[in-house]
Amino acid sequence: MQKLVIATKNQGKLKEFKEILGDYFEVVAAADVGYNDDVEETGTTFEENSYIKAKAIYDFCHLPSLADDSGLMVDALNGEPGINSARYAGGHGDDKANYTLLLNKLEGVTDRHAKFVTALTLILDNDVIVTHGQTLGEILHAPVGEFGFGYDPVFFSYDLQKSFGVATPEEKNGVSHRKRAIDALLLKLKELNF
């Protein structure tokens, strides 16, 4: 089975990629191929950041490399936290601090529409494939559930009619922004006869 290197240190994301792509690839983390550096995300869009991360891994190991840049976009906050979702409250990956800041900013706000978005970049020897996915919902007034990671406990999924924080991994993976971007990626790989 072809090895696919995922450009992430986020164990939650890695687990999702393994669950969704495990039938197609041997999914490994960048650290598994010896890449332990932090890639500086200097892009201004999800697409740019996913490309920067995938290219750094590919240049290091010359294996198929996949990176995503994902985030939460809230209508009433003009798309915040957006590309800064993982470090919204300052530190990188402090889920509780991030969603607490978000809830504070939305205090008293009635329009709580939001979407999770993903841009995926896969770099193969001669191809760069970029796909997108999104899932719609709204921000709850308080966290519900312990499952998932990031903003999952405060995101009410319209597809599931419940918080991602109470959704099983199978339920979330069936409708998530990442799953939809991966589905689009698999279609493109079929077109390339990969």
Image (cartoon, rainbow, N blue to C red):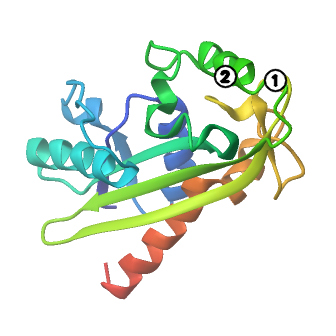
For residue 111, what is the image quadrant? top right
Please tell me whether mark 2 sits on a helix, a strand or a loop: helix
**What amino acid does circle 2 point to?**
Tyr
Where is mark 1, residue-wise? 143
The residue at 61%/13% (across/down) is: 97
Neighbourhood count class around disc 1 (C-alpha, 10 Å): few under 14, some 14–19, many 20 upward: many
| Residue placed most toward the observer, 127 or 102 | 102
The residue at 13%/66% (across/down) is: 125
Q: Is residue 9 left or right of residue 89?
A: left
Please state the horizontal and vertical placement of residue 3, each as a whole percent of the image: 29, 54
Q: Distance between the residues labelled 2 and 1?
A: 8 Å
| Residue placed most toward the observer, 30 or 1 | 30
Please state the horizontal and vertical placement of residue 54, each as a whole percent of the image: 25, 48
**What amino acid does circle 1 point to?**
Pro
The quadrant the N terminus occupies is bottom left
The quadrant the C terminus occupies is bottom left
Please state the horizontal and vertical placement of residue 98, each as a whole percent of the image: 60, 20
Where is mark 2, residue-wise? 99
Please tell me whether mark 1 sits on a helix, a strand or a loop: loop
The residue at 84%/33% (across/down) is: 140
Q: Is residue 4 above or below residue 97?
A: below
Q: In this view, does 118 lie above or below 71?
A: below
Q: Is residue 173 left or right of residue 42?
A: right
User: Tags 2 and 1 in contact by the CB under 8 Å rule?
Assistant: yes
Q: In this view, does 56 lie to the left or right of 158?
A: left
Neighbourhood count class around disc 2 (C-alpha, 10 Å): few under 14, some 14–19, many 20 upward: many
